[in-house]
Image: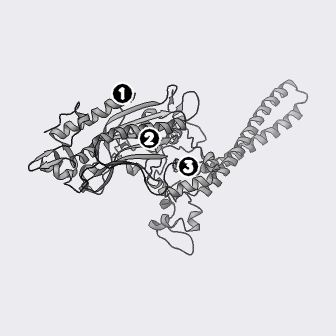
């Protein structure tokens, strides 16, 4: 199905003549548009879905990217809950009623198609039996010939009915699949519906008044080299580069001690992985298409996609659950509008991410709490005002059931900024990308954690340093003494 703006130019209603650019915005209130184009989901951001291949008469396995398992039937059974969750996430461009009608129609069409296929097979069997009988009974061949002709006619009619039914089945299946792929994950019962909820607040007796920004400190004491193109391009110098290594080494060693296995994951991704993670294409850096590689490629670095690319379309042995992994490296995001925030809005940063898998939701919920507590114990050592916040549903990503953030107070901005987060994605991604438990077709449950954003953390730490005359001293970080020589 093509996007709305490519299929119509003006609303056909006699009461309104809305131009091409306003059609989508008006679609919810205009019946003539809503009836035909009920699920735009941002005008089909993926245009042609990388997860769904339209069914062909001649099956070619290479054209089938994944076997989707979106549990749409289970979600429609609790339609009221689905509508409530969509509303709380501020998603208003999916018509659940129309989706339900299409799904019921699809089930009826598939049932009818199956009956016709069975009827066709019966005709084929009868033809074979009658041919055999004709060869063995020459005397009664006329009666057999009449019956054979009748069965062949029925078979031809059945085959034509299947052929005529096929376009309706495929178009209905496409509408159902594309709409279902735009549904977000379920919401955790502890996810707040309107405002973020502060779970714990560590208000250290530290001066929280506005200070010099990390940009000013970096330039004043020659700690950061910013590029001529702006504060988005930079590199650390001297003690900051050593601090970056120290923080990375400290977190990596803690994770290894806790039983995590380090992975070297991919940084470039195909649309299948991006869409499978429920990430919109404008949230990831897209590489320019080349003649030798006409498909889209995306650059994200260390992210949830790094781990998903490793386990997609795989059967996972979860006998010794949970399975815990971590990866450390560069992370890349598209350029943001506010360039004055320096390292707080850096397009490239160093991150440490973790990823865990288990067999059921209860284990997953306990895993989220464990990872949250472990990270909170680490970050309290910095002696900087910080807090744990459970993020409300309107701010969640499409794949998240729940997200908990650890935030530090940024003195120059006079507000809290995210330093770390733990996201429960449950079975949302595994159902879309065929990640199964090896003993059956049950989906795998997942939790992703952005354990450390080194670049942002260093920027905040710089603003808590002491400035005396022409000297600058970093805040005391005694737990890093093994990894970093504190500059005097």
Residue receiving disc 2: 273
409 or 138: nearer the viewer: 409
User: In terms of image quadrants, where is residue 146?
Assistant: top right
Q: Position of residue 450 (x, y in %)?
A: 37, 41
Whole-Å distance between the Cαs marked 3 and 2?
17 Å
Whole-Å distance between the Cαs marked 1 and 2?
30 Å
Can the viewer see residue 190?
A: yes
Outermost residue, left side: 470
- Crowding at label 3, few (<14), some or many (≥20) Cα neighbours within 10 Å? some
Q: Earlier in the sequence, mark 3 or mark 1?
A: 3
Residue receiving disc 1: 257
Q: Is residue 422 left or right of residue 216?
A: right
What residue sits 86% from the left and 33% below the top? 144
- Crowding at label 2, few (<14), some or many (≥20) Cα neighbours within 10 Å? many
Q: Position of residue 54 (x, y in %)?
A: 56, 45
- Residue 384 lies, with reference to residue 439, above or below; the image says below
Q: Earlier in the sequence, mark 3 or mark 2?
A: 3
Question: SS for tag 2?
Answer: helix
Residue 180 tag number: 3
């Amino acid at each position: 199905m093509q996007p709305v703006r490519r299929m119509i130019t003006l609303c056909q209603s006699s009461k309104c003549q809305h131009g091409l650019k306003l059609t989508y915005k008006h679609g919810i209130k205009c019946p003539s548009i809503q009836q035909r184009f009920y699920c735009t989901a941002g005008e089909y951001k993926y245009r042609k879905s990388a997860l769904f291949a339209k069914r062909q008469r001649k099956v070619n396995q290479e054209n089938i990217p994944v076997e989707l398992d979106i549990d749409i039937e289970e979600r429609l059974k609790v339609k009221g809950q689905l509508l409530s969750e969509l509303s709380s996430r501020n998603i208003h461009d999916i018509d659940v009623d129309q989706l339900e009608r299409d799904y019921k129609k699809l089930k009826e069409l598939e049932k009818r198609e199956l009956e016709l296929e069975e009827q066709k097979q019966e005709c084929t069997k009868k033809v074979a039996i009658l041919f055999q009988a004709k060869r063995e009974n020459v005397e009664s061949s006329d009666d057999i010939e009449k019956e054979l002709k009748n069965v062949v006619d029925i078979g031809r009619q059945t085959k034509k009915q299947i052929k005529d039914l096929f376009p309706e089945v495929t178009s209905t299946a496409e509408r159902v699949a594309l709409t279902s792929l735009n549904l977000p994950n379920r919401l955790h019962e502890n996810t707040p519906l309107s405002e973020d909820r502060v779970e714990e607040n560590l208000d250290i007796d530290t001066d929280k008044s506005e200070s010099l920004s990390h940009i000013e400190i970096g330039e004043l004491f020659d700690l950061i080299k910013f590029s001529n193109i702006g504060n988005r391009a930079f590199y650390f110098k001297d003690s900051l580069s050593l601090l970056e290594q120290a923080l990375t080494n400290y977190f990596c060693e803690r994770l290894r001690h806790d039983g995590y296995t380090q992975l070297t994951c991919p940084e470039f991704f195909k649309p299948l992985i991006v869409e499978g993670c429920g990430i919109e294409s404008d949230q990831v850096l897209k590489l320019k298409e080349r003649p030798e590689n006409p498909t889209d490629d995306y650059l994200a670095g260390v992210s949830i996609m790094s781990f998903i690319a490793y386990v997609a379309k795989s059967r996972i042995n979860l006998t010794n659950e949970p399975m815990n992994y971590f990866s450390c490296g560069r992370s890349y995001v598209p350029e943001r509008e506010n360039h004055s925030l320096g390292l707080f809005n850096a397009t490239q940063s160093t991150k440490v991410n973790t990823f865990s898998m288990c067999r059921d939701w209860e284990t997953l919920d306990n895993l989220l709490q464990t990872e949250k507590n472990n990270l909170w114990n680490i970050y309290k050592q910095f002696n900087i005002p910080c807090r744990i916040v459970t993020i409300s549903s309107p701010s969640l990503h499409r794949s998240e059931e729940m997200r908990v953030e650890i935030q530090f107070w940024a003195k120059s901005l006079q507000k809290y900024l995210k330093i770390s987060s733990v996201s429960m994605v449950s079975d949302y991604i595994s159902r879309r990308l065929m990640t199964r438990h090896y003993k059956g077709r049950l989906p795998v449950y997942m939790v992703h954690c952005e354990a450390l954003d080194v670049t942002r953390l260093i920027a905040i730490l710089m603003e808590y340093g002491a400035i005396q005359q022409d000297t600058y001293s970093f805040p005391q970080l005694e737990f890093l003494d093994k990894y970093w020589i504190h500059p005097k």
